[in-house]
Image (cartoon, rainbow, N blue to C red):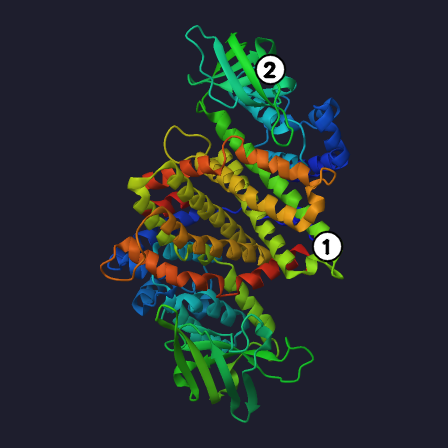
Amino acid sequence: MLNIDSLRFPRYELPAALEPLRQEVRAFLDETLKPYSPLVRSNTWDGFDPDFSRKLGARGWLGMALPKQYGGHERSALERYVIVEETLAAGAPVGFHWIADRQSGPVIARYGTEEQKRKIIPGIAKGEICFCIGMSEPNSGSDLASVRTKAERVADGWLVNGTKIWTTNAHRADYMIALLRTDSNPDSKHRGLSQFLIDLKNTRGVTPRPIQDLSGRRHFNEVVFEDALIPADALLGKEGEGWKQATAELAFERSGPERYLSCFILLSKLIDEVKDRATPAVLAKIGAEVAWATTLRNMSLAVAGMLNEGVDPGLQASIVKDLGCQFEQRLPGLAQELVALEPTLAESGTDYQQVLGNLTLLAPSFSLRGGTLEILRGIIARGLGVR
Amino acid sequence: MNELQKILDESVTKLFEARVDREFLTRTEEAGFSQELWDLVEEQGLPQVLVSEDGGGMNAGWADAYVVVRACGRHGVPLPVPETMLGRWLLERAGAPLVDGVIGLLPQTVRLGANGHYSAECARVPWGRDAACFVGATDGGELVVFDTAQASILEELNLAREPRDTVHFREAKPLGRHALDLPPDVVRWLGALLRSAQIAGAAAGCLEMSVRYTSEREQFGRLLSQFQAIQHHLAELAGAMASVDTMAHSAFTALDTLGFKATGRDARFEIAAAKCRASEAVEMLTRLSHQVHGAIGFTYEYALQFLTRRLWSWRAEFGAHGEWGEVLGRTAVEQGGDRVWAYLTN
């Protein structure tokens, strides 16, 4: 059993030296995001805008913690944290560079070959390369280790067959980092997996089929591999180490501030909406969520601080994600409780109504992607020593 | 934790683990104030941590004091250690002489009459009956100290059977009046701060008992902790505990760094958020702790109730989440939606 008193979120405050960067980003976003409607902004990390990503890259705000020799900026992970916080809070359309900047770049920097790093990382830092994540499969969702899409070693590379699913942006991404089975008879299903860097634009036999989400939008896909031949040097990291590498990749995915900041704009709009009808009871409800927002920020900063100090924040990150998505999923219902306006996507609706409509439809995904709530709670239970 | 915090943490944990067990808590609920434990607590200097070294204290900051206040909650310590700590900090801040023994904090703002005397019924004074003096902040920017002989006391208890007395002053002349550079409702703010840390501590206690109990108790041939439904209850408890702990600690730290300011953003935002979050969390903390314990946790004999009854009491004391949420909500509306993020990150 865990010593409960060791389950702490060590207080972490960003160095004051980062404040000028924050102000610079804010000023840039204020200016750049002017033409974007609140509805568009409410897509945050689903918002896909290559031009915006290029602008961010031109400022040196992508690939920030990646090595300079490959076009990164070797700035601290904390500086990146500031960029991520500010872009999300402002509702910037970060979807094009999001996965590359957050996880693909760091994974390649850590496990990639010299050539892979030279080839890919500069484009990530410039905001010119879009990545997708090839993890889930039709029969392999939360039970990720059961993936079956296989890569067979052949004379001129690897032959890939199988299907990935729920692959956000696969239909418009340049690359996928895929978790594939390279050994069908390992002594454990966690072994026999390897990661590959797949060039989606230049590989035959890879077919992304967009899947409409419940709102009718096409952002995720089924990706079918039919005798897709990829070169031998597409292997990322070591053969058979795919599980370990994918777990490390997921840790990048689970530890950022996006877990409570993907619909901050709804809280902002709701605050303005109740302004003229603010009874004490209404203010109390709003205030409780403001308390949550600031609590989650403190918890998220603690995770960033742990990462910065080389401490594994796996348990803490899972707790932030669990609490963060509850916070986000609560907001649309709370909005309805406090304000008698219907959610809508129609142009006739107010900004508030559109934001509410969009996030009502998006909210179910918050506790699914990057590890379901159930998986996270399992991780937390394991951290407590009961699993 | 810094060195001082580690030392404090070790020593308070050792003291409370050795002294404050189920038997002690049961006995104290019958017998009242334990002078014996109070003497030990004073010996370790706990109510003095915030006092300067010249004043015989540790000159610690609020972030250090957090360790002590949280531990008081963690073990359900039935003594006014946090209140006296705050009382002595206020006395020193106002340049008033320090007082030995328990300080009876007057939760509401004191309004002296034109003749400088005080007549009022002060409700919910923690350990009023055991106080060596009463201390309150006035609407005129003063800290006032009253002799206990000037008050009559109606003994009352909170749900955890901790003394919360009504103290009746009739034309009481303060023993001392001292200029205070803090808001008139400072006791309410800092009382809320203390309770948030105590709730964080009791939450950790509830979580620990819940994890331990479910790891020992078998049903259907399995440990309770092996059931996924139970694991998810425990995970939710952990999240609630961690959120309260993190926010409360942030508020203590903010008091060191920002303090109270005449205008603009100060530690009050964090304090309100800490008490709001803590009080709101009590529902889940108590519900799930009791749920995983089954009927045994609902008995007086089993120690969980010493913590959960405190949680229910502390939730309300110095304002529950509704009241503090309103404060935060008003701040948010005044800032305007577009400014809230900048305000949070300021």
Instruction: Provide the chain ID for the residue under circle 1.
Output: B
Q: What residue type is labelled 2?
A: Ile
In the displayed image of the protein, which residue is found farthest to the bottom?
A: A155
Residue A124 vs A204, above or below: the answer is above
User: Residue shown at 56%/19% (left/top)?
Assistant: B166
Residue A44 vs A17, above or below: the answer is below
User: Residue shown at 66%/55% (left/top)?
Assistant: A384
Q: Spatial distance from mark 1 to mark 2, Cα to Cα?
A: 46 Å
Tag 1 and tag 2, C-beta contact below 8 Å: no
- Going from N to C along the chain, the mark reached first, 1 or 2, is 2
Position of residue B281 in the picture relative to residue B222 (left or right): left
Q: Does mark 2 fall on the same chain as mark 1?
A: yes
Locate residue B313: give its quadrant: top right
In the displayed image of the protein, which residue is found farthest to the top?
A: B115
Instruction: Provide the chain ID for the residue under circle 2.
Output: B
Q: Where is residue A316 in the image (x, y as percent from the top left)?
A: 57, 54
Residue B246 vs B191, above or below: the answer is below
Q: Where is residue B122 in the image (x, y as percent from the top left)?
A: 52, 19
- The residue identified by callout 1 is B215
